[in-house]
Image: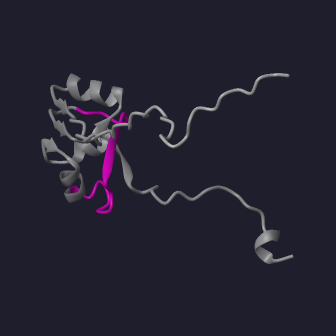
Amino acid sequence: MPLHRRLPKRGFTSLTRGDVAEVRIGALETMQATDIDLAALKAAGVVSQQTIAAKVILAGKLSRKITLKDVKATKGARAMIEAAGGRYEFTLPMVEDKPKKEKKAKKPAKPDADEAPKAEAPKS
């Protein structure tokens, strides 16, 4: 039996695992910027440069005003930001709907002109 069939199969490795980063509120406290978006998080080194999205989670304390723009946040993190006097601004990206194709109306089947309607044979 080949080696790849003899070894045990375990787990799953996601190819998109590192695309979304979790950011703690304590990390936002250490940043000097007041307007925080994904570019500011990358510039401060809080998330990696390959990150395409981030989500702020409730872990740590926040004692100053910040404005969180276009970065997702949990309910608890939003409440803590607003309690500190800051703002949370997140706009959903606009996704254009594809136009639906119209279904063709079914035409009633018409008998050909060559064919005459078949008459039933009389029973004997």
- Please give left or right for residue 82 compared with residue 75 in the image: left
Q: The N terminus is located in which quarter?
A: bottom right
Q: The C terminus is located in which quarter?
A: top right
- Please give left or right for residue 120 compared with residue 69 in the image: right
Residue that appears at 77% across and 63% down: 8
Q: Is residue 54 magenta?
A: yes
Q: Which residues are magenta?
A: 44-62
Image position, residue 101 (x, y; %): 34, 41
Q: Is residue 111 above or below residue 123?
A: below
Q: Is residue 14 above or below residue 26?
A: below
The quadrant in which residue 104 appears is: top left
Q: Is residue 95 magenta?
A: no
Q: Is residue 44 above or below residue 109?
A: below
Front in this rendered view, residue 74 or 115 = 115
Image position, residue 43 (x, y; %): 19, 58
Image position, residue 32 (x, y; %): 15, 48
Front in this rendered view, residue 33 or 4 = 4
- Please give left or right for residue 13 compared with residue 10 in the image: left
Residue that appears at 38% across and 50% down: 20
* Residue found farthest to the left: 34
Q: Main secondary structure of the magenta part?
A: loop
Residue that appears at 30% across and 38% down: 72
Front in this rendered view, residue 76 or 29 = 76
Q: Is residue 31 above or below residue 105?
A: below
* Residue found farthest to the bottom: 2
Image position, residue 19 (x, y; %): 38, 55
